[in-house]
Amino acid sequence: MWRTRRNSILKPDRQLPDGSYLSRIYSSTSDRRKDRNAIVVRVIDLCAKVSPWAKFRATKGAVKLNLLLDHDGLLPHFAWITKGTTADVKVARTMQFPKGSMLVFDRSYNDYDWFLSLTEQKVNFVARLKDNASWVVVETRPVAAGSNVRQDEIIVMTQHATEDNQRFFRRVVWWDDKSQREFVYLTNHLDLGAEIVAAVYQAR
């Protein structure tokens, strides 16, 4: 899921008959400036006075549409409409996923206790790791020279670091040639190649 800043106003590309309009959002500021890698979104404005149940700010209303997409066909399996102020991860915690699923999401879903719950359900995930995350390295895996993989580590989150802990995650640091920057991924799949971990996230 790509996100926009709270104070962003999405410029209309095409007005639709029902009053909504089509606009574009980008995965990064660089993409926005170069007008590349955009996805088209449908924007529906709500008035706080007319739709008090969708209160977002003092004079604006908003709802959030949460979709669970099947990557094979890019078709939604489930859809939830919530208030615009509802955190994404709050909805995600209510979902049930089939055993063996691979989930991919951004940093807004970082909830390490929930990640453990997914692991216990044998549901895999790949996510971006927050910059302020705290962890302890348990194992450092070798990285091939010249690879885009900068680091491949087995870690335990500091909040779970106890003497009898057996709940581990994996931290993969990937250098992206296209954007010339590092990305740090977190996954509970300990056996995938580090390159595949990065590719899974990039395919979202």
Image (spheres, helix red, strand yellow):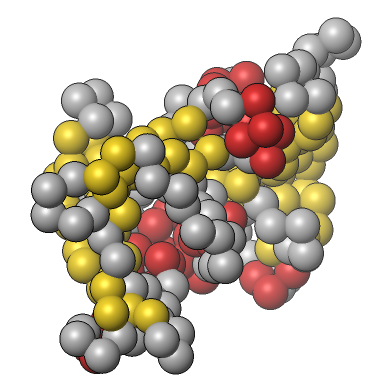
- Pick whichever, 187 or 86, lies toward us: 86
Res 140 visible: yes
Relative height, residue 179 to residue 39 (above, below): above
Relative height, residue 20 to residue 40 (above, below): below
Relative height, residue 188 to residue 89 (above, below): above
Please provide percent x and percent y for residue 96.
22, 59
- Pick whichever, 148 or 51, lies toward us: 51
Q: How many labels does the image show?
A: 0
Please provide percent x and percent y for residue 197.
56, 29
- The quadrant of the picture occupied by the C terminus is top left
Q: Residue at x 21, y 84 (%)?
A: 51
- Pick whichever, 34 or 81, lies toward us: 34
Q: Residue at x 68, y 41 (%)?
A: 29
**Horizontal relation, residue 119 to residue 145: left or right:** left
**Horizontal relation, residue 108 to residue 97: left or right:** right
Q: Which residue is drawn at 74% across and 69% down?
A: 158
Give the quarter of the image for residue 53. Answer: bottom left
